[in-house]
Image (cartoon, helix red, strand yellow):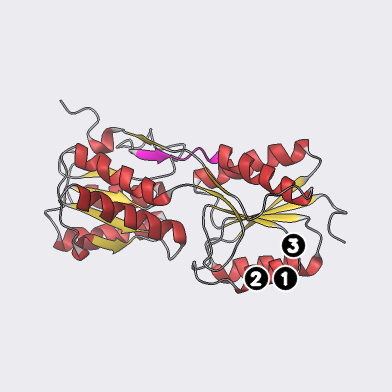
Amino acid sequence: MPGAAHLIAFVTPDLAESHLALAAQGAARVLREAGYTLLVAHTESDPAAEAQALELLLACRQADGLIVASCQPHDHDEIFQRLQRHSLPFVLLERRISGVEANFVGWDDQAIGAAATEHLIARGCRHIAHLCGPATSNADARFRGYTEALVRASLKVCPAYVAPGGAGTDSGYQATRQLLAVNLRLDGIVCYNDAVAVGAIKATLEAGLEIPYDLELIGAGNLPYGDILKVPLSTVEMHGEQAGEQAARLLLEVLRGASPKPPQTVLTPFEVIPRESSRITAV
């Protein structure tokens, strides 16, 4: 019977993304104070592994509720519809699922994409590429923000400047190599996250370009080592711990029968943190 174990599952695609690791910490602290234990299920950004984990949690019925940062494509709602039909409470974290009416804690990702792009525009970049994330709602929104910022600045939105960067360092490295092979006019890259940006930095330096003088970069997530890289990385701080705390409190409201109807959306603040990868030291 759910509720007997006082167990909450936190399903995440990648704990290497620092804001999600911090979200797990924030959620664990709030839940512990309420008498719950947090179980973390790491799916390695594999939608099939995530679906399997959710099916297992649904079948065993040991978890009182779930906090899910889903890696499912944003229009794949079947497993979440099943969770709702079987009355297993959950809160979506960071990524929405089309067709699923659920409590959500995350960020205004379109605004994040726009703010990162505007930062490079303000530094003087005019030929700005974007390394897109996976096929999730937050990645799509960051891409929309990127294009929105270019249009507002009367800059061309060029399909040749957009590459699938995925969510990891290697994908960012490969995507940047491909971009630089055909787009040597590039002077800026907005990366889906910091891991992608680390790969982009590696590929840029290997190409013999100097950061930030030949090419400027910005990521998102504020990796804990981002300020001690060979080229300290400009990023978007997302305050993941605060998001995790909010998700836990919202789930506790559901478990106590006090959750507002319709489902609630809570957006966590963010801020751009400029470092040397976008010429913070330039005169």
Q: Which residue lies under the disc numbered 3?
A: 88
Q: For the magenta stretch, what is the residue range?
A: 235-241
User: Looking at the image, which residue is at 78% across and 39% down?
Assistant: 34
24 or 180, which is in the foreground?
24
In the depicted structure, whether residue 246 falls above or below residue 7: above
User: Looking at the image, which residue is at 47% across and 40% down?
Assistant: 238
195 or 193, which is in the foreground?
193
214 or 37, which is in the foreground?
37
Query: CB atoms at circles 1 and 2 under 8 Å apart?
Result: yes
Q: Which residue lies under the disc numbered 2?
A: 81
Q: Is residue 170 left or right of residue 240?
A: left
In the depicted structure, whether residue 171 falls above or below residue 223: below
Residue type highlighted by circle 1: Arg
Query: CB atoms at circles 3 and 1 under 8 Å apart?
Result: no
User: Looking at the image, which residue is at 51% across and 41% down?
Assistant: 268
Mark 1 vs mark 2, CA separation in Å: 6 Å
Q: Which residue lies under the disc numbered 1?
A: 85
Mark 2 vs mark 3, CA separation in Å: 10 Å
Residue 84 covered by magenta stretch: no
Residue type highlighted by circle 2: Gln
Q: Position of residue 69 (x, y in %)?
A: 57, 56
Q: Residue furthest top?
A: 283
Q: Is residue 241 left or right of residue 5?
A: left
Answer yes or no: is residue 116 visible.
yes
